[in-house]
Image (spheres, grey):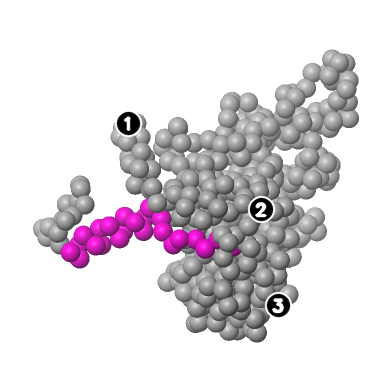
Amino acid sequence: MKYLVTILALLCVACSTADRSDGQTGTATASSAARADGHAAGDGKTYAITGGTVYTLGAAGKIEHGTVLVKDGRIAAVGANVEIPADAERIDASGKIVTPGIFDPQSQFGIVEVGAVKETRDASAGDSRFSAAFDVADAINPRSVLIPVNRIAGVTRAMVSPTHGDKHIIAGRGAIIDLGSTEGFIHRDAAAMFAALGEAGAEQAGGSRAAAMLALREALQDAKDYADNTSAYASNQRRKYALTRLDLEALGPVLAGSEPLVLHVERASDIRAALRLARDFNLKLIVSGGAEAWMVADELAAAHVPVLLNPLEDLPAHFETLGSTLENAARLQKAGVLIAFATGDTHNARNVTQAAGNAVANGLPWLDALKALMLNPARIYGMDQDVGTLEQGKLADVVVWSGDPLELSSFADQVFIAGRKIPMVSRQTMLRDRYMQAMREQHALPPGYIMPTAP
């Protein structure tokens, strides 16, 4: 069975040459710095997206019959009366909706290809409870076949995170990437530290939540002591720490408040424990999961702690999620908590729009659902100066939708990532077209294709 799965995985990759072509994404000639400063240079063209209903998610709000002008990888102008250069390529968005791109706040793009094949999984390392120094950026494959599948559905940027709770209480560091390039695709490395408490953390600490919290506190205390006594440690004048030197150093920015700690917790009591931890160490905390976050919404809002959640989570799959509800997002937003949507399904991250639509059906205002997909993840990770809204000077992550982005019947007609016009092609569309053509022509069927016969 193992070999069968491996063969199938290799076949999937073999079918995806168009997905993996550098030329298709226009990156061969574009300069590509690996960080936010000078991250994008576009594809050398100017684009004018005209006639659409533009939801900027910024100060300009909604613009009817608006124009978004894209030049040199950034938004040059947005408005109802934008002067369009003669050399601009026009994209007619009449009768359509134009928004910023979707930002997936917790994904595994490029580090997990086929879940059943361990050789394609790079999301965790070792058996230690602590792997703070583990950095997914070193393993990200920008030619993953999962990337084109999701980017042509409007996902333009993502936080790539290690697997939390998989052998580790502290899983490691995540990186923010754009999904439109194979060169300079890392927008920000070491963008957040990921850890887990609750049931997942307890399993790694001997079975008790208290033991997991004790272990995490010890790790942070050791990292603080190390930061205060680095020279003494180097001369062997400090006590032995629970973590390696690399892990201690990796936790330094977390303790300094320059790098957020994304902590996976579901139960209300675990969220309260996480809030106490953040207060004690002055951490920049982000709650991931938060099935029962609505129960402590006021406390989260008072502490200015955002929540990454799946709006579709409403079943008691675990004891810690007994309080799950489809109204979680609406209740948190009403209390003033900054929320962002993450389904945790990298293979189908595109389905997050459906999840957002369900949040609207359960009380979340439509515009706030749009922000939870596009703007709020950028705000949570401190990237909103670059992405998240359609405003002059920002990176041109733009999506033209056939209709309401939260409706199942709507699709992305055109996607731009950092000013690059993305070919609306993936392995899945190629396979679809291959067999649709064969069925239409009724001859010259591709190898291995067997026409189904009526019973």
Give the magenta range.
Answer: 417-441
**Callout 1 touching callout 2 (CB < 8 Å):** no
Residue ID at (57%, 34%): 124
Ranked by sequence position, the earlier of labels 2 and 3 is 2
Residue 324 can be seen in this image: no
User: Which residue corresponds to mark 1?
Assistant: 3
Residue ID at (64%, 33%): 134
Residue type at mark 2?
His
Image: 217 above or below 20: above
Q: Picture quarter containing residue 329?
A: bottom right
**Callout 1 touching callout 3 (CB < 8 Å):** no
Determine the secondary structure under disc 2: loop
Image: 2 above or below 140: above
Image: 331 above or below 162: below
For the residues labelled 1 and 3, the Cα–Cα distance comes to 55 Å
Which label lies toward us, 2 or 3? 2
- x, y percent for residue 137: 61, 40
Residue ID at (60%, 60%): 42
Residue nearest the viewer, comparing 77 with 328: 77
Residue nearest the viewer, comparing 291 with 286: 286
